[in-house]
Image (cartoon, grey):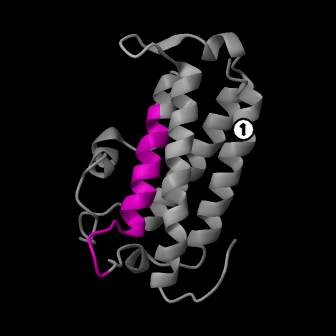
Amino acid sequence: MTNPQKLIPLFERTHWIIKQQTKDLSHADSLLQLPFRANTMNWVLGHVLHGRNLILHSLNLPPALDETRASRYDRESEPMTDADEAVPLATLLAALADSQTRIVAALNETSEADLAVIYNEKRQTTVGDWIEFQHWHETYHVGQLEILRQLAGTDDKII
């Protein structure tokens, strides 16, 4: 069974890393493209937020970013390079902070029995399994932020 209290520090850690890796960067920095097929920082952050919207949904909470805007960052969508199409970096970071607050509050009010409820009948996945998977997926993308921060010319070390 998934213990909701053990999930909280995991989300706190990745949110801290996101804040550190995006510190002092501009919206234009978030749209820099590596010289090969890869996602921009803006896409990575939007994709993390899309995943957090899925977590919020599994906890019966509204999304942190409007689903229409968040869907642009769905799996296998094209890298976000158009400044006019991209959600502004400040908006993404504010929505991520909102998702953080609400996920932690929800987990504080959630029991192990709540997380044991089947979320996906076909796969026999529980709510807890789903949240754990989404967090693992988040860590994969949060790791990409280090290289994308360096692409913006920071030449620093966060972790």
* Residue 43 is one of the magenta-drawn residues: yes
Q: Which residue is mark 1?
A: 8
Q: Is residue 50 left or right of residue 83?
A: right
29 w.r.t. 61: above or below: below
146 w.r.t. 120: above or below: below
Residue shown at 56% from the left, 41% from the top: 135
The amino acid type of the residue labelled 1 equals: Ile
Secondary structure of the residue carrying numbered label 1? helix
What range of the chain is rendered magenta? Answer: 35-54
Label 1 crowding class (10 Å Cα cut-off): few <14, some 14-19, many 20+?
A: some
3 w.r.t. 136: above or below: above
Residue 31 image offset from top left, x and y in percent: 35, 74
Q: Quadrant of residue 104?
A: top right
Q: Is residue 98 left or right of residue 125?
A: right
Image quadrant for the N terminus?
A: top right
Most frequent secondary structure within the magenta stretch = helix
Image quadrant for the C terminus?
A: bottom right
Residue 116 image offset from top left, x and y in percent: 61, 12
Is residue 63 in view? no
Is residue 4 in view? yes
Residue 19 image offset from top left, x and y in percent: 62, 64
Residue 96 image offset from top left, x and y in percent: 54, 51
Between 92 and 12, the residue placed more toward the observer is: 12
* Residue 49 is one of the magenta-drawn residues: yes
